[in-house]
Amino acid sequence: GPPPPAISAMEASAVDLFLDEASYPAASFSLLSASQTSDWPGGDSCVTLNMTIDADVGRGATFTAYGLKGSQTHTGPVAVTATAGPAIAGATAGFDQGLGTLSFGLAAPLHAGENVQFTVSLINSPSPQQAQAVTAHLWDGQLQSIGDEAEVPGTKKAAGGGVLLALETPSTQCVAPSPAWQYATCPTHALDTGHSATCEVTCPSGAFRAYNATSKSFDTVMLAVESGIPPVANTETTITVTLQPDRQLPTGSVLTVSGLEGTQTGERSAGPSCAISGRCFVQVGGADAAHFDLTAGHWNGSALALTLAKPMRNDRPFAFSFVLLNSLTATLAGAVPQVEVSGGGVAVPPALACLCDGCDPLLNVVSTARIFDLPNITESSCDMCRVSNLTLSLRPLIDLAYGTTVTVTGLTGTRTRSGVRSLRGEHAAYFGGEYEWDQASGTARLAVSWSPDGLVLASTQLEVSLEVHNGFPAQQARQVLVSFRTPDHVDATMGKVVSVAMAGSVLSFGGLTAVGPPEWPVGVGGSLAAQSWIP
């Protein structure tokens, strides 16, 4: 074919789509196969794509796999693990649930005859579906599209013959995931392998995408709030739980909210003569209370178990409430419950509280040091190996000149590689739209480079977002600091965030501290109470 058009050195360095400035020949896959570890409806499946191409393809080319329909995994980035050959996909790929496509730009060149394998973890359809073929295409930068149908082991290669996340008949036995899958192949979800292989307990399971529980009287209920606001003793309190599972939970699933210690409400059960909504029980109500069996419920003094009378979908938040009587002597510690689901063919382990729209920040830091006023750090995902947007909210108490560097340290345990990365959020332009990231030390450096006022004025509310890839497996608590350095090299550090142990997530913080120049008043105001757990 004709040679590629000439490109500038800048263009060549920005997009490395050409090898030795030669045009690519017509290319195809000499090997393309797909497999999955689980065909259980509603379970996690580790999908492996194996391919070899007969022509060189440069970094930046686009790979797309089609036919991955039927998954409950929502549209967005999914974790990718290289199992053989170069890591051409990097750390994440884009998944489109409606189209059933997986796509990414090659992070490394792929040479002719070089075999590569990579895996992604997707959630199977909640019900059996018709089989479908899987195809793949590479776009090499010169408008040449190449592709073949994937050969799926154990199936007939015919029209619509690929079997991947879409099954004609369900599996007859639920098999517990192997340790190799849990820790090496597809480390996306926390999996339960500690029980015997029965369908009710050890079907592949995943954590909730997000949920929160709030209460006007409980001090801390899956949210970090200031401990200076005490609960009201000996009064009824309504606890509202909002959750969204990452897969459809079938009828018969039992949802348990546990860890509600210190209440006067004694043990009781619902039944034909006592509905879960009555005062004889715990007055279950709210927008989605009708999803529960009215006559099936149990409260044991610290945990509430309810049974689904119809499926709980995974495409919207799900809210319900219940009423408990606070203790005679209210404590500042509050309650931090956990939510788990079992039965119905899908087991979901205890999950973590994540941020929701309109909720108070899960993580908070407070200081009276003259640096930033009430900075907050929140994260969009608590799930292991999921991409999470860390939102940093700051309000400086002094004017910040150009060249001032804001540094967040202690974000260790991520899978995000070092380098200059794109900064998002309402005020990203103030920092040039980018930040410098160091994976080993977990440090993000943001440099003030623009403001409509010539400098960032004191009391300006700043909010930016850093996209990072949560770690795996679960991480212990981390101490995170927010600091800054002025252009004349005056250093100041403020804020350790509250102690929270999260399941593989980046934000695992603890304590409060502040230091500064001798002439500045140094101190810490306020305290926070928060707890969490690791599935």
Image (tube, helix red, strand yellow):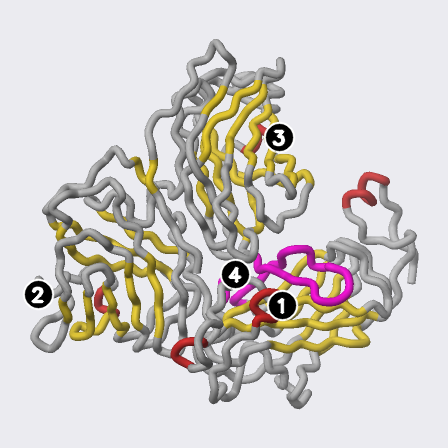
* Left or right side of 491 for 531: left
Q: Is residue 104 above or below residue 334?
A: below
Rendered image quadrant of residue 161: bottom right
Q: Which residue is mark 3?
A: 432
Q: Which residue is mark 1?
A: 185
Q: Amino acid at mark 1?
A: Thr
Tell me the crowding category of disc 4: few under 14, some 14 to 19, or many 20 or more residues within 10 angstroms, Cα based. some
Q: Which residue is mark 2?
A: 280
Image quadrant in which the C terminus is located: bottom left
Do the residues under discs 4 and 1 have CB atoms within 8 angstroms?
no
Residue 75, numbered label: 4
* Left or right side of 76 for 15: right
Q: Amino acid at mark 2?
A: Cys
Q: Earlier in the sequence, mark 1 or mark 2?
A: 1
How far is mark 1 from mark 2, CA to CA?
A: 49 Å
Q: Earlier in the sequence, mark 1 or mark 3?
A: 1
Q: Is residue 228 above or below residue 44?
A: above
Residue 302, numbered label: none
**Callout 4 secondary element:** loop
**Picture coordinates of residue 193, whole percent (x, y):** 48, 72
Rendered image quadrant of residue 34: bottom right
Rendered image quadrant of residue 4: bottom right
Tell me the crowding category of disc 1: few under 14, some 14 to 19, or many 20 or more residues within 10 angstroms, Cα based. many
Residue 370 seen by the camera: yes
